[in-house]
Image: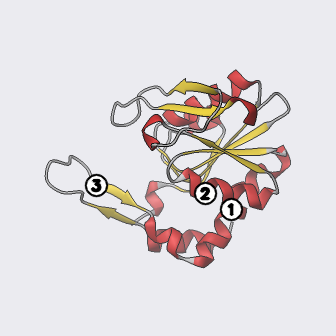
Amino acid sequence: MTAALRTRLAELFAWVDPGPGSSHLVSDVSRWWRDPQVLAALGPALVAPFRAERPTVVVAPAVTGLMLGPLAATALGVGFVPAHKPGDGRLPAGPLTWARSPPDFRGRQVDLAVRDDRLDADDRVLMVDDWVATGAQVRAVRDLCAARGAHWVGVAAVVVDLPDPVAAELGVRGLLTPADLP
């Protein structure tokens, strides 16, 4: 990953106040998706630390992961499997394997599902997401992979905000930390 990409990601990032009643600022990464150079560089930069692990599929949770996952999969030359949330409005047809996350930074538990016929014991799974703050969704996706018999390779994230022992346990590697952001 180039220093230029890291600099550009930080330049395009913003914290937004969602308004009255909110107890915290919200990250706004929407300008990342508008910049063609960032889009072209993100997939290869995310997967670079995992190439030697030879992932066979990329899994990413809705919503932002649905943009990053295909970029990473394309960079690896492998397929993509979305991890759906029940509130997404459209669950795929067919049998699903579900997992529930432990509480996230807001105390919420998230249910995630993948189609049963999209992951199997021959798969080596790389998860991709924009921000990993607690590892809650990572744990749910890892549980989905285990339930389907797939091998867990790790997680590629744009921003990693985890203690080092948790990042090591889950195999999380990132491009930025919160300290890199304005």
Q: Where does the image place residue 37, in percent across and percent down from the top left?
A: 62, 77
Q: How many marks?
A: 3
Q: Where does the image place residue 42, in percent across and percent down from the top left?
A: 64, 65
- Disc 1 marks a residue whose amino acid type is Gly
Q: Are marks 2 and 1 in contact (CB under 8 Å)?
A: yes
Q: Is residue 67 left or right of residue 50?
A: left
Nearer to us in this view, 132 or 180? 132
Q: Are marks 1 and 3 in contact (CB under 8 Å)?
A: no
Q: Image quarter for residue 83?
A: top right
State the residue at coordinates (53%, 74%): 8
- Image depth: mark 1 or mark 3 in front: 1
- Disc 2 marks a residue whose amino acid type is Leu
* SS state under label 1: helix
Nearer to us in this view, 54 or 88? 88
Q: Is residue 50 left or right of residue 113?
A: right
Count residues near mark 2 (Cα–Cα under 10 Å), then give few for <14, some for 14-19, many for 20+: many
Nearer to us in this view, 37 or 92? 92
Q: Where does the image place residue 117, in percent across and percent down from the top left?
A: 75, 32
Colour scheme shown: secondary structure
Report how far apart the C-alphas of labels 2 and 1 lie in the structure.
7 Å
Note whether 75 is above or below 60 in the view shown: below
User: Which residue appears farthest toward the left when viewing the image?
Assistant: 20
Q: Which residue is mark 2?
A: 68
Q: Which dot marks residue 25?
A: 3
Q: Image quarter for residue 119?
A: top right
Q: Is residue 11 left or right of residue 120?
A: left
